[in-house]
Amino acid sequence: MEKNCTDALPLTMNSSKNQETVCIFGTGDFGRSLGFKMLQCGYTVVFGSRNPQTSSLLPNGAEVLSHAEAAQKSDIIIIAIQREHYDFLTDLTEVLKGKILVDVSNNLKINQYQESNAEYLAQLVPGTHVVKAFNTISAWALQSGALDASRQVFVCGNDSKAKQRVMDIVRSLGLTPLDQGSLMAASEIENYPLQLFPMWRFPLYLSAALCIFFFFYCVVREVIYPYVYEKKDQTFRLAISIPNRVCPIAALVLLALVYLPGVIAAILQLYRGTKYRRFPDWLDHWMLCRKQLGLVALGFAFLHVLYTLVIPIRYYVRWRIRNITINQVKSNKDDPFSTTTAWLSDSYVALGILGFSLFVLLGITSLPSVSNMVNWREFRFVQSKLGYLTLILCTAHTLVYGGKRFLSPSILRWYLPSAYVLALIVPCTVLVLKFVLILPCIDKTLTHIRQGWERNSKISKSTLNGKMDI
Amino acid sequence: MEKNCTDALPLTMNSSKNQETVCIFGTGDFGRSLGFKMLQCGYTVVFGSRNPQTSSLLPNGAEVLSHAEAAQKSDIIIIAIQREHYDFLTDLTEVLKGKILVDVSNNLKINQYQESNAEYLAQLVPGTHVVKAFNTISAWALQSGALDASRQVFVCGNDSKAKQRVMDIVRSLGLTPLDQGSLMAASEIENYPLQLFPMWRFPLYLSAALCIFFFFYCVVREVIYPYVYEKKDQTFRLAISIPNRVCPIAALVLLALVYLPGVIAAILQLYRGTKYRRFPDWLDHWMLCRKQLGLVALGFAFLHVLYTLVIPIRYYVRWRIRNITINQVKSNKDDPFSTTTAWLSDSYVALGILGFSLFVLLGITSLPSVSNMVNWREFRFVQSKLGYLTLILCTAHTLVYGGKRFLSPSILRWYLPSAYVLALIVPCTVLVLKFVLILPCIDKTLTHIRQGWERNSKISKSTLNGKMDI
Amino acid sequence: MEKNCTDALPLTMNSSKNQETVCIFGTGDFGRSLGFKMLQCGYTVVFGSRNPQTSSLLPNGAEVLSHAEAAQKSDIIIIAIQREHYDFLTDLTEVLKGKILVDVSNNLKINQYQESNAEYLAQLVPGTHVVKAFNTISAWALQSGALDASRQVFVCGNDSKAKQRVMDIVRSLGLTPLDQGSLMAASEIENYPLQLFPMWRFPLYLSAALCIFFFFYCVVREVIYPYVYEKKDQTFRLAISIPNRVCPIAALVLLALVYLPGVIAAILQLYRGTKYRRFPDWLDHWMLCRKQLGLVALGFAFLHVLYTLVIPIRYYVRWRIRNITINQVKSNKDDPFSTTTAWLSDSYVALGILGFSLFVLLGITSLPSVSNMVNWREFRFVQSKLGYLTLILCTAHTLVYGGKRFLSPSILRWYLPSAYVLALIVPCTVLVLKFVLILPCIDKTLTHIRQGWERNSKISKSTLNGKMDI
């Protein structure tokens, strides 16, 4: 529901008894926007400023006083001032005692200071209840009401009553407060608006590298080679044919890379005989961005599907088919139906369709609202069992596709095999390793280790009351 | 998790100590359904009625008393009575003092009364804590347990303890309470269940108008014109060919209309030299329904993709291709391969595929659960940068498509150009304007204005402590 | 936002005043993992154990004491012990008095015990505040931080302050607490992690049965029959042709089965003359899994679309089209364009495209985050009105497809009609019944019944104050 307090009648609101006064320190753009929104929603707003004089920029109906005067008018003070200028607040310590200070500030860089702005504020003005809030909302969004992005306001603070009051204000402005716990969470909250898809960086760089490599690999084999040897201009292949080789390769390799870290982790645990040693950092990071890797892979698979489905409407394809037919007519040759070719052609297409459909299912399950609906067991079932089935189907799709092409001549051009042969290396490795890991004997040891057993532990599990503890 | 209290054993529940009594005024369908659900979940339910007599309609186990008697049994009273009959509650003011009254009523029309039912109730019976709740849940959903739609119960009220108690009851019925703040939110909550996609109305009407116009435009050019001049029956084009012209045009124009209001707003701000003057209402409304416009455009793009991909399995297309081949054989003409045509054909298809894929990505990002996961910076990046890239790709797709067709004769029929030429007007305008706006000199002024600077302001920013304030 | 307390500096945290001590009973894998996570997030952790001795398995910084000693250190005690061993807690009743016990246990089977573990614990140690929490999080997820699945921690308990404190701890660990109400919810919460898609079982079994039946039906007609009579090897049809018959049939029948229970329910209500009698259990269950049925149907429709769109790139199809062209050239026969065939072909394809697009729209609307955004009226509009429109379009698609095929000879093979004829039975029945139900006279009675009217009720509605009650 979009609560839009803009439409409320101001007269009704002013007459309501429980109208609160909120004080805002700072008359910058964000302070004014917040004040404007609060006035709209029925609050009385008092600005605290160094030069208290009403300006045309300030929203109508707001009072401007000196900092000390403004602070006395309300027990909630929003500090819309940059961190570098917090110092002057120390002079107001007496006035601010027991009041709620709302830190709305953001930094310019992630982890710019050692402690968060809100924690710094709390140290600076002891005796106040500092609450972090509103930093994820932009001034523009507050003014225009176009809160398309996120209505979420992360709130944290050590005093739960103060936090509750700020959350009530957040709610009354039509935003969604999210309690993030104690003030320790402030540095996370302050870093949040500065991030630009941090978990997507590695998957995107990796896939860009893969695409560029395979693109030039294919250009060499399919454009430069024919040009050098046959003087044929195949440049038009750059638009669809070659992208349609690169996309499935990227999709398959990335999908395999989603499951590779799990396999490596299992091997590490088997080798170490314990699960209580940290994985190397690169493996940890890799495991944490598996979802993003998988979604990028799904994107490439989607492109591959589209590129494949438009094949019959391409001029080149229609021209070639027409020419084949005409040549057959002219040569008066018979072209008997080959059941084997039909089987190969149909089955690699069918494998691809099934693999893609399962892949889409995996993608849907990773939508936040869907994955919140499933429990851990269901999530594991989908992402692990169905995920491996997808990998198997897609690898088989490529193998059977190859099965057809292996028969055709000129596989190697300049000693370079077809690109899809290279693409098969990673997925086949992952599948073989996984197959070894699920052999009963190895699987049993691994399960033991994952339940907390240690190969080299002198204290056996039982002495730790293991049998009765969870 | 679906909490289903239906399966709980009633015996166990009745023996539990903390069984609460809830009183329901009114024995209408909703009152009975709510009582039924509450009994199932272990509450003791007392109905208050004008004619207290147990009826077969009332759920088993519920008591029926007079209003005054019933009210004394519980400190939570659910008012399942229509607003027009609230008057009799004034007689009970003494009995109801200090109790929690839950207003569950809905109206028949949006903004039917000046103040919300809940606020009216609070005025009518002073000394009570009125809480608005349950109005978004239907009687049928309560009875059947088929809460497919929304389990969300919007709750608001001025007394936070009363609100908390009602929210606990909501939770215990397996529903999700959403705190909407003070009783001022009640009118919004009461309007909510009466809405039928209010934000979608303008985009849908607009796209309907676009579709109808372009449909008849194409009918004139492609069905009536050939019939008049060549006596050819082309009516079969109404099923696929013409929709496949209308859909991409609607998609492209609507996508451009998503970005047009932003451009207009920027021009307005530049012209006025300030961001502190409200946009005209039509622009405000347009900006607020950009998401819906974009999603409707995505729907048309999706239809266009499907219509295009089925081309090769259409009887008409197969018949034409066969005839072309046969004619070529018969005429014994050579048809040399044209690299230019291959390039044009492949690149407009490739541009379309890339544009559509980005468009789908934009659509996925606008899913509520996904857009809640991204911060403001990420949302802007996707919706603005990727959005413009989508618009550029789709416009280029149309231009290159045109590039092929411009060569063919008979562009004008009855002085009417091809429909796609008309479709290009809006997107090209938007792209040119945007290009002008991001020229460094103009962009700098605009950024200043958006940070709060005013061209005609006498008080310069610095005197407003601008440098230190956010 | 992903709150990751791992990165916080432990030194800063140790110096913070509001560091809490949490006691964990049990040093099993889950207890240790939870302790590890809590230490990371700045808590002081004390383990209570039968044999208090520090082990290398326990996280660094945690103290291990006897149960009684450990319990005295904190007023929050996490019971990471299996239910079978709760007995020893009775000896500690005195020490535990007034403290918060957090039950984190799970069972091996759904409804393994009569009362939930948490309720059992509350009975066993009276005078404590038992809170159920953390059972949906796995030890592995706590250790690795890979909380991909669900960050949701269901929390329930009778004491709201105790619950609030546990929810604060949950939040500070970067997880999302969900208040589920009183301890009565514990059995639901304990069953939750053991479920594996309970609502999907019936739809999946049903669709499997449908698929297998129609697959063999088609094999008999299209593979065995030609082999017996014409000695033709049509086995390659198993890969795509036959799946592409089975998928649309399964999709259509399942979609019709989504709407059949609603029709049956309406007929039952009309027959009984009341809505206050429970539906038979099978109907109830059927109605509750309609959403899942519809999504499975959508999956089959998606497969059907893909299988159809790849038709022109299949070897078999290309070979056949080539042969038809060649034969036509050789026989020198003219093949005049048939407008009727073009109309039939185009319109069944167009109906299919529109039906599928609406179907996708229905699927998107059933995403949890989307359906939470719409109110009851909007949800009904989409799922009922648009749903029936989808069913009508898809049935018409099949009928027009049949319209073309009815003309071709050899409909019956071994007295078996084409599979799609069988597929039409259920949807046509549903549509005819629905058409009857929306006839004004019947619809009026039904609406009355659904508003609470009873045909055989002696007490008329008005005496129940029906006119004024909701």
Image (cartoon, coloured by chain):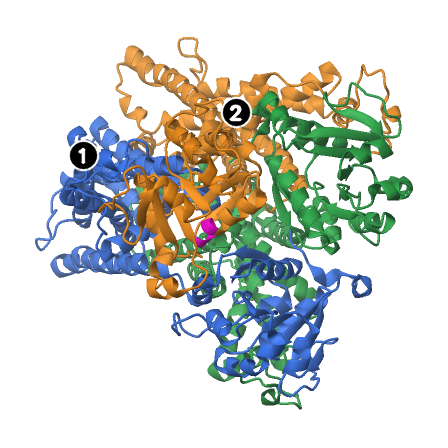
Chain colours: A green, B orange, C blue
Q: Type of residue at label 2?
A: Gly
Compared across the picture, whether C245 is left or right of B267 comes to: left
Q: Are marks 1 and 2 on the same chain?
A: no
Could you tell me if the residues under marks 1 and 2 are in contact, i.e. CB atoms within 8 Å?
A: no
Classify the position of the C terminus of chain B by image quarter.
top right
Instruction: Tell which of B76 and C311 is nearer to you.
Output: B76
Farthest-out residue, top: B415
| Residue B197 x/y as whole percent | 44, 30
- Location of residue A231 (image quadrant): top right
- What mark, if any, has residue C445 been given in the picture? 1
| Residue A365 x/y as whole percent | 48, 54
Residue linked to disc 2: B403
- What mark, if any, has residue B314 been given in the picture? none
Farthest-out residue, left: C415
**Residue A407 is a magenta residue:** no
Q: Please tell me how many numbered marks the rendered image carries.
A: 2
Name the residue: 28% across, 32% down.
C346
Name the residue: 33% across, 34% down.
B321
Chain for numbered disc 2: B
Q: Which residues are magenta?
A: B169-173
Instruction: Tell which of B420 and A182 is nearer to you.
Output: A182
Compared across the picture, whether C398 is left or right of B423 comes to: left
**Residue A166 appears in the picture as rendered:** yes
Local SS, label 1:
helix
Seen in the picture, residue B323 relative to A275 is either above or below; the reply is: above
Q: CA distance from mark 1 to mark 2?
A: 62 Å
Chain for numbered disc 1: C
Query: What crowding class fits label 1: few (fewer than 14 Cα within 10 Å), some (14-19), or many (20 or more)?
Result: some
Seen in the picture, residue B162 relative to A445 is either above or below; the reply is: above
